[in-house]
Image (cartoon, rainbow, N blue to C red):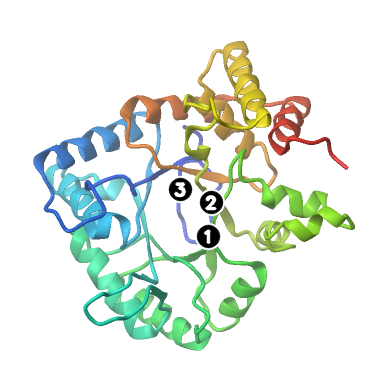
Amino acid sequence: MKKLPINDNGLNASQLVFGCMGLGGGWDRSPIQPEHVKQAHEAVEAALESGINMFDHADIYTLGKAEKVFGQVLKEKPGLREEIIIQSKCGIRFADQESGLPGRYDFSKSYILESVDGILSRLGIDYLDTLLLHRPDPLMEPAEVGEAFHQLKASGKVRSFGVSNMSAGQIRMLQKHTDEKIIVNQLEMSLNKIGWLETGVHVNQEAARQNTFPEGTMEFMQMEGIQVQAWGSLAKGLYSGKNIENESESVKQTAAMVQKLAEEKQTTPEAIVLAWLMRHPAAIQPVIGTVNPARIKACGDSVNISLGREEWYSLYVSSRGVRLP
């Protein structure tokens, strides 16, 4: 698999990222079972065979079990840690019924430091290649976050830092208070979730009122050399095999177009959907969330697929359901 350009922090990452949210069983407190470890081994092996060397976690995924089961894989595969890039996220706190506390976000220095210690313990590793702040905390004190980043870097626990679901303005404010370069912003982006494109297309258009994607964010990340990562990149299989009997005509037409292109290029629908994202000049890095080995491998060919401008626009216009203004 082709690699992205090596950034200032020396990460030599694959163009696809394996998202580990589906590992570890259910989102409950039930213990990890042998079949969960087996599933993790098979998924990781499929990713490695597909050329993927970057793995995306979050401390909340299956309530910490995703990291625990991945840590078991690392333990049973000596040497793997040094061959891969591990990224995790923190900052989301679930509601606590016993204390009555609501679900919330927490970018306090103490919580960030505590979260990283928990992540490293569950994974059974000494450091993270990248730590992302998961969702914007309205009470964020950027200088306090900067202190946490500095302490984590100085201690060797985290080598680089990023964010998830943030606007250009939020990143600018955070960056002003830390010497650590923000190298990643992970956003929901897919052939079905196209607000990131519509923001640019709808400049000076009434339709802009209906789009919530923050204006200027894509341009800012490109100018600042911040890696754009796309979560939800496969659109939950909407164009690559999911039952779409009750979906809109535009979804059905787009799925048919994806299938036709896959047949013409002798590849998979998953590869077409991902290649469409990667055709954008922002060098988008899709995060794939499936744990099915066959589907992981079906994604791998995306880095070898080239879509022409007309093919790209045909998919885009079909997905949006109406012609361009």
Toward the viewer: 122 or 128?
122
- Select label 1 or label 3 by which is in front: 1
Q: 212 above or below 272?
A: below
Residue 223 occupies quadrant: bottom right
> Disc 2 residue type?
Gln
Which numbered disc flags the more N-terminal residue, 1 or 2? Answer: 1
Which numbered disc flags the more N-terminal residue, 2 or 3? Answer: 3
Q: Are marks 1 and 2 in contact (CB under 8 Å)?
A: yes
At a point 32% along the width and 80% down the height, the residue shown is 101
At a point 65% along the width and 27% down the height, the residue shown is 254
Label of residue 229 in the image: 2
At a point 58% along the width and 47% down the height, the residue shown is 189
At a point 75% along the width and 49% down the height, the residue shown is 198
Q: CA distance from mark 1 to mark 2?
A: 7 Å
Question: Is 13 left, or right, of 79 in this rendering?
Answer: right
Label of residue 184 in the image: 1
Toward the viewer: 65 or 251?
251
